[in-house]
Amino acid sequence: MTANSSPLIRPLAVCCVCLGNICRSPMAEAILQHLADARGIPMEVTSAGTAGWHIGRPADPRTKAELFAHHIELRHRARQFTSADFVRADLVLAMDTDNQSHLIARATTQADLAKIHLIRDFDPRSVPGSEVPDPYYGDQGDFREVFDLLTAASEGLLARITSDGLSPWQTT
Ligand code: 4NP
């Protein structure tokens, strides 16, 4: 099934989640939205942090630099994940297992739980359970690695959507 014949009646809502919502998840949001738009796949991507330390702040300059180098736009203010995100999102994509555990603890329904995935589990070349390493205390090279991991995961997710049509994890 092609993206154009997708049975989705509204854009797939995806929320990418990391710890601070300034490094990895804003980058994931921008990459996934950019690639979905380029393929004509209706998708609305947001991001949030499990912690609230950076609420209202822009993305880390190293995230912005990496995206700028790839001609991907990002307008961002950090925010904290809330239970409303479980309602809005079809998919909640955690960057690592700590964030995944936090999300699982916050889930209140089976439907919430079913939305939670590790983002790299959509990369067919990654080992199940793989994480996007936290680059905050690293250098630009670590952000470059995050960019590559998130691009592979995003491509994998979009390939699944394109080939599966209405996905097994979308029930509405
Ligand atoms: P992120 O990275 O979770 O990818 O946004 C971090 C940002 C800030 C901190 C840790 C990780 N911090 O400790 O403030």
Image (cartoon, helix red, strand yellow):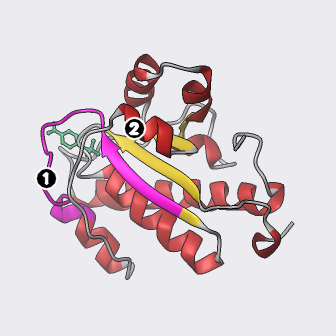
Quadrant for ligand 1 reads: top left
Residue at 62 percent across and 29 percent down: it is 114
Name the quadrant of the C terminus. Answer: top right
Q: Is residue 37 left or right of residue 54?
A: right
What residue lies at 12% left-to-right and 38% top-to-bottom?
Answer: 53
Q: Distance between the Cα atoms at labels 1 and 2?
A: 18 Å
Q: Is residue 69 above or below residue 100?
A: below
Q: Secondary structure at mark 2?
A: helix
Mark 1, secondary structure of its residue: loop
Report which residue position mark 1 lands on.
56
Q: Nearer the viewer, mark 1 or mark 2?
A: 2
Q: Which residue is mark 2?
A: 84
Residue at image point 60% right, 62% down: 11
Q: Is residue 151 visible?
A: yes
Horizontal relation, residue 130 to residue 1: left or right: left
Residue 107's place in the image compared with 165, above or below, is: above
**Residue 118: x and y, percent?**
53, 37
Q: Amino acid under label 2?
A: Ala
Classify residue 110 as left or right of residue 5.
left
Q: In the image, 110: left or right of 30?
A: right
Numbered range of the magenta stretch: 44-63
Residue 140: image location, x then y, percent: 24, 61
Residue 146 location, quadrant: bottom left
The residue carrying mark 1 has its beta carbon less than 8 Å from ligand 1:
no
- Report if the CB atoms under discs 1 and 2 are less than 8 Å apart: no
Q: Residue at x 34, y 40 (%)?
A: 18
User: Ligand 1 near label 2 (Cβ, under 8 Å)?
Assistant: no
Q: Give amino acid for label 1.
A: Gly
Label 2: how many Cα within 10 Å (few below 14, some 14–19, many 20+): few
